[in-house]
């Protein structure tokens, strides 16, 4: 008989509750400080934003409840650090850096569903499946859509950064015509993934 373990029991098993609560507190405090996600967007995403994973498989990164916010916070930390290292003429306003980091993956909030197959979880590390009920979009596109639908004003650079962060390397338009902000976001996101995969 197949075990139908759900994410709530995984929380207890791996003791992620404290980490989720700590990340929630940090995320909401920084959100208030930088005035990024509107009340409407926070209400729409709800607790799912705080408990969503960042990916589907353990071989990827942060495939656990709360993995998404954990990733967003780490990406933000790296992005702020990268921005500080730039020459003054290239630095980006910190508000914009935090804004694109906080928003770039909110499109993952409802994207993954817990995998009920114990065999797939235990043998392949496939903890989640894709939610087939959602309209197909890249994560950055869905994130931009959610942001604009729920009252967040984005500059052209902020929008471009969010929708292009997950475009493939061979996408010449996003590579050669990107902004400093989009480059900061891409690099910070990649560094965060590397760190998360090594934990």
Image: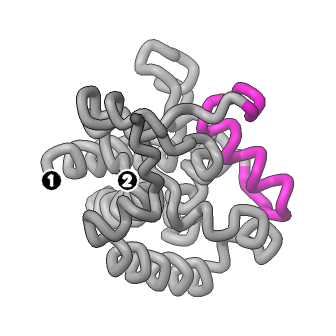
Q: Determine contact: label 1, label 2, CB under 8 Å.
A: no
Determine the image quadrant of residue 35.
bottom right
Point 58% across, 78% down: residue? 31
Label 1 crowd (10 A; few <14 / some 14-19 / many >=20): few
Q: Nearer the viewer, residue 131 or 135?
A: 131
Point 52% across, 26% down: residue? 167
Which one is in front in this view, the residue at disc 1 or the one at disc 2? 2
Quarter holding the N terminus is: top left
Name the residue that disc number 1 marks. 199
Point 24% across, 50% down: residue? 196
Name the residue that disc number 2 marks. 64
Please state the horizontal and vertical placement of residue 113, each as a whole percent of the image: 56, 42
Q: Nearer the viewer, residue 199 or 144?
A: 199
Q: Nearer the viewer, residue 73 or 169?
A: 73
Eyeballing the image, is 48 above or below 32? above
Q: Please, what secondary structure does the residue beneath circle 1 have?
A: loop
Q: Please, what secondary structure does the residue beneath circle 2 have?
A: loop
The residue stretch that appears in magenta: 133-155
Determine the image quadrant of residue 117.
top left
Quick one: label 1 or label 2, which is nearer the N terminus?
2
Eyeballing the image, is 187 above or below 93? above
């Amino acid at each position: 008989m197949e075990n139908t373990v759900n994410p709530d029991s995984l929380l207890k098993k791996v003791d992620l509750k404290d980490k989720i609560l700590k990340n929630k507190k940090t995320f909401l405090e920084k959100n208030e400080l930088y005035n990024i996600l509107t009340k409407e967007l926070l209400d729409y995403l709800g607790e799912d934003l705080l408990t969503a994973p960042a990916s589907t498989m353990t071989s990827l990164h942060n495939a656990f409840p709360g993995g998404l916010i954990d990733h967003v916070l780490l990406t933000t930390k790296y992005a702020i650090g990268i921005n500080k290292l730039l020459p003054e003429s290239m630095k980006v306003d910190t508000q914009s850096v935090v804004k694109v980091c906080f928003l770039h993956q909110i499109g993952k909030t409802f994207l993954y569903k817990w995998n009920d197959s114990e065999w797939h979880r235990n043998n392949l590390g496939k903890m989640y499946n894709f939610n087939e009920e959602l309209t197909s979009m890249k994560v950055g596109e869905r994130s931009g859509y959610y942001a604009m639908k729920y009252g967040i004003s984005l500059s052209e650079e902020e929008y471009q950064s969010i929708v292009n962060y997950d475009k493939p390397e061979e996408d010449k338009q996003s590579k050669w015509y990107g902004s400093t902000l989009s480059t900061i976001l891409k690099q910070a996101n990649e560094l965060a993934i590397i760190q998360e995969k090594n934990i």
